[in-house]
Amino acid sequence: MNHRVLNASLYMEGEALVWFQDFEEFGAFCSWETFTKALLVRFGSSPYDDPMEAMQKLRQKGTVADYKRWFENLSNRLKEVSDRIMLSWFIRGLKDDIRYPIKLLNPSTLQQAFGMAKIQEEYVSSIKCQ
């Protein structure tokens, strides 16, 4: 195996590591070029991807932290969108029992909204445990 490929694999985790291990079994990465092309095909963005559309459809399914991670992955690809619109999209995607109290508090930044959402999530969780 190419030493550059081996070095890159040491930094892989999660889905990327599983992908790499599957391909490694077959000796698929005989060169750096083969590896980088396969990596881009599997994990790179497509010219058909629309991060704006994906952002507008994004909804919280798990924890607030998970949702924020997904949100940040998309927002990093949308540099031309204003902070105010990003804030609106973030709040709109939250679960109802978190979104409505956050809207009432009217945060002015994403960081404020995230902090408030985390607190509201903990509150909702504590009520469900009682």
Image (cartoon, grey):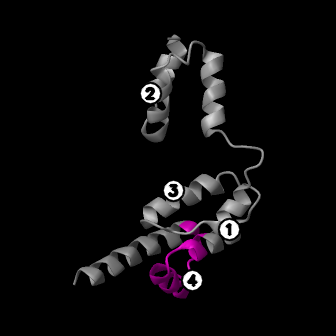
Residues at discs 4 and 1 in contact (Cβ within 8 Å) = no
Q: Which residue is mark 1?
A: 56
> Which residue lies at the image location 65% right of the left edge and 67% below the top edge?
57
Q: Earlier in the sequence, mark 3 or mark 2?
A: 2
Badge 3 vs badge 2, beta-carbon distance below 8 Å: no
Badges 3 and 4: C-beta atoms under 8 Å apart?
A: no
Q: Is residue 110 left or right of residue 98?
A: right
Say if 105 sits above or below 87 in the image.
below
Residues at circles 1 and 3 in contact by the CB criterion of under 8 Å: no
Residue range highlighted in magenta: 90-110
Q: Look at mark 4 in the image and give the residue it sits on.
A: 106
Determine which residue is flagged by label 2. 21
Q: As displayed, is residue 80 above or below residue 96?
A: above
- Kindly identify the amino acid type of the residue bearing the numbered disc 2: Gln
- Determine whether the residue tagged by mark 2 lies in a helix, strand or loop: helix
Q: Nearer the viewer, mark 2 or mark 4?
A: 2
Residue type at numbered disc 4: Asn
Q: Which of pointers 1 and 3 indicates the residue nearer the eye?
A: 1
Q: CA distance from mark 1 to mark 3?
A: 15 Å
Sequence-wise first label, 2 or 1:
2
**What residue is rendered at 60% in x and 13% in y?**
31
In this rendering, the label closer to the viewer, 4 or 1: 1
Amino acid identity at mark 3: Arg
Which numbered disc covers residue 69?
3
Q: Main secondary structure of the magenta part?
A: helix
* Helix, strand or loop at mark 1: helix
Question: Label 4 neighbourhood size at 10 Å, few (<14), some (14-19), many (20+)?
Answer: few
> Tag 1 or tag 4, which sits nearer the N-term?
1
